[in-house]
Image (cartoon, rainbow, N blue to C red):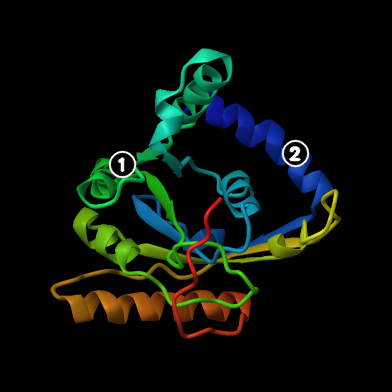
Amino acid sequence: MPPLYASAHRTLGILLRGLWPTTVTGLENLPATGAILAANHHAIADQLFLGINTPRHIAFWAKAEYFRGDGLVGGLTRRVVTGMGAIPVERAGGRAVLTAFDAAVPILRGGGLVAVFPEGTRSPDGRLYRGRTGAVRLAAQAGVPVVPIGIRGTDHIRRAGDRFPRPQAISLAFGTPIPVKVESAPDARRLTDELIAAIQALTGQEYAGSYAPIRHG
């Protein structure tokens, strides 16, 4: 675990768990080897609560611009994302996006954890949306399982119109790892649907049946 990540894991963890009591179940399902952690996505806080409640380092995605910052704020941001072991993601699309997957594969093959939100963006209404196939394709490429994770409560921490965060119980449930073997596009679609169904079983969310609209900002 990178030193900066370990420090934040310890100090931020105490603070967040003190403010928002958190229940974690199923940690015994976390493999000792590499794996993708695939969770539903309510809010930006999902990354925080997933990170502080997982006893191992998680490589999260971060905009590539954060790794190129200069000046006081930009330089500090660059040091933070680098020190946290984040994976840079280019927003240009095409092959530029695939470089993030290329960077994740050695981490996974080396026994690390990578977090992916298969819905692709935050849910706009609390429902669980159709999963995109990138998570299972990445798992297949790296030869690792996918662990479904259900996060509940983060959508109520700060609702529209709130000036300040509100008290709220949070829960995280780690499901049984799903082995992945993708030989065709139908395989990727089927496994992704199975993954979303496993997440839904952990959260009890209503299933929307369509892709979530991409949010900007």
Q: Tell me what residue is drawn at x 45 percent, y 22 percent.
A: 69
Q: Give the x, y percent position of residue 105.
A: 25, 46
Q: Answer above or below: position of 70 versus 23.
A: above
Residue beneath the point at 36% across and 45% down: 91
Towards the viewer: 107 or 176: 107
Which amino acid, mark 1?
A: Ile
Where 24 falls versus 112 (above or below)? below
- Which mark is on residue 69? none
- Count of labels in the image: 2
Q: Are marks 1 and 2 in contact (CB under 8 Å)?
A: no
Q: Position of residue 140 (x, y in %)?
A: 22, 62
Name the quadrant containing residue 172.
bottom right
* Label 2 secondary element: helix
- Circle 1 is placed at which residue position? 107
Left or right, residue 59 beside residue 206: left
Name the spot of residue 56 as percent of width and height, x first: 50, 43
Classed neighbour count for the residue bearing mark 1: other residues with Cα under 10 Å, few (<14), some (14–19), many (≥20): some
Residue 23 against residue 132 in the figure, above or below: above
Q: Which amino acid type corresponds to the residue marked 2 in the rendered image? A: Ile
Q: Nearer the viewer, residue 107 or 74?
A: 74
Between the C-alphas of marks 1 and 2, the distance is 27 Å
* Of 70 and 169, the residue lying toward us: 70
**SS of the residue under disc 1:** helix
Question: Residue 14's mark?
Answer: 2
Quick one: label 2, few (<14), some, or many (20+) residues within 10 Å? few
| Residue drawn at the location 48% of the way across and 40% of the way down | 57
Q: In terms of image quadrants, where is residue 169?
A: bottom right
